[in-house]
Amino acid sequence: MHMNKKLEDLIPELQQHRRVILGHELTPIDPLPRLGQDLGIDLWAKRDDCNGLAFGGNKVRQLEYYLGPGMDMNADTVLITGALQSNFVRLTAAAAVKLGWQAHVQLEERVPSNDQLYRKSGNVFLNNLLGAEISYFPEGEDEAGADRALDKRAEELKNQGRHPYVIHLGLGSLPYGGLGYIRAAAEAYRQVIASDNKPDYVVIPSGSGLTHAGFLVGARAIGWDIPIIGICVRRDQKSQTDRIRQRSNELTDMISRTGLITDQDIIISDKTLAPGYGKMNQQVKEAIEKTAQLEAILLDPVYTARTMAGLIDQVRTNAIPKGAKVLFIHTGGNPAIFAYQNAIESFS
């Protein structure tokens, strides 16, 4: 039934929102048989690391909806804030190149480190290569302050005759990026239905919340009642549950489907989060090594490896039972591997 419909037909309310196409429309779902066998599950990966824009990643889908309003405003400059090794920042710089805009990226000090690989390699190197203007923000957990600093820079650019568009990521702004993952859920559902290979669980990173909340809202909007387990990469379980509840409610309002998500839909684990955002632990290192050495798939320490570590923990604690079919959402972030080389090699 669903395979004969366009994604817009599955969730027609998405057409209310302007989308700028930046990446591949369809990313593959690949089997991970050797890692799955090692864990005792049937494991698959939705490969959003393969969506075509400057090393790819989940933020490509989000930017397609964030930059739509910017196009309507005839913007020529985009501003965004994020951690030093932010994939969102790198992909915003890449999207600006595609659109012929200038990117101003603000890098926040979220992970205390004097490691020169962390400070200069990976996404930082790519931001420079893509021609972004770079500034720095001294705090790492002040979303409102970081957004205010962007607004101040936008005013300066406006006074210089530019047409700036600011991507606000704090809780006071509409989560346009989540629309991209509403769409991704419909895309994934069509793929698994076509292959007659429906998973029992989805495991997904939960950071800013837009990927997790968007996929959850998208799944429920098309009637896909699958457990979607968010793995914390930045905040603890309670804080993240509150955030996903808020973001899910905002997204359901944005597609005129208020009340679609209940508290029972929000499943979150923070058991692989310590010692915190962007910091290594043994579970993360194991996830990086297992996935590389069994499947030749690379995971970054900040999002995807922490999420795979969470998936492994869910299996080992029987929260996901042996033999279950699990879909892992690979959200990209591979350039950060190079920035974390010393941390990965030295961690034991």
Image (cartoon, rainbow, N blue to C red):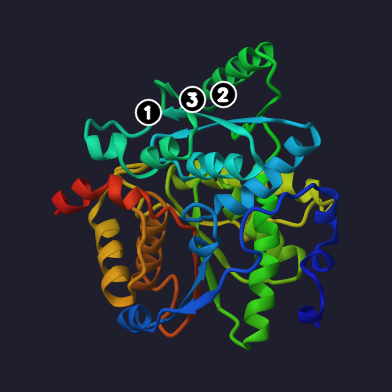
Sequence order check, earlier mark of 2 and 1: 1
- Secondary element under disc 2, as helix, strand or loop, is helix
> Are the residues at dot 2 and dot 1 in contact (C-beta closer than 8 Å)?
no
Q: Is residue 38 left or right of residue 199?
A: left
Residue that appears at 64% across and 38% down? 100
Kindly report the distance in space between the C-alpha atoms of the residues bearing marks 3 and 2.
Answer: 6 Å
Q: Which residue type carries mark 3?
A: Asp
- What mark, if any, has residue 27 been given in the picture? none
For label 3, the crowd category at 10 Å Cα-Cα, with few meaning under 14, some 14 to 19 and many 20 or more, is some
Q: Position of residue 153 (x, y in %)?
A: 58, 17
Residue mark closest to the camera, 2 vs 1? 1
Where is 205 relative to 197, above or below?
Answer: above
Q: Is residue 233 left or right of residue 296?
A: right
Return the residue at label 3. 142
Sequence order check, earlier mark of 3 and 1: 1
Q: Is residue 101 left or right of residue 347?
A: right
State the image quarter where residue 234 is shown.
Answer: top left
Q: Position of residue 330 (x, y in %)?
A: 47, 63
Return the residue at label 2. 144
For label 2, the crowd category at 10 Å Cα-Cα, with few meaning under 14, some 14 to 19 and many 20 or more, is some
Residue that appears at 37% across and 28% down? 109
Residue that appears at 64% across and 53% down? 22
Q: Is residue 245 visible?
A: no
Return the residue at label 1. 109
For label 1, the crowd category at 10 Å Cα-Cα, with few meaning under 14, some 14 to 19 and many 20 or more, is some
Where is 326 relative to 64, above or below?
Answer: below
Q: How many marks?
A: 3
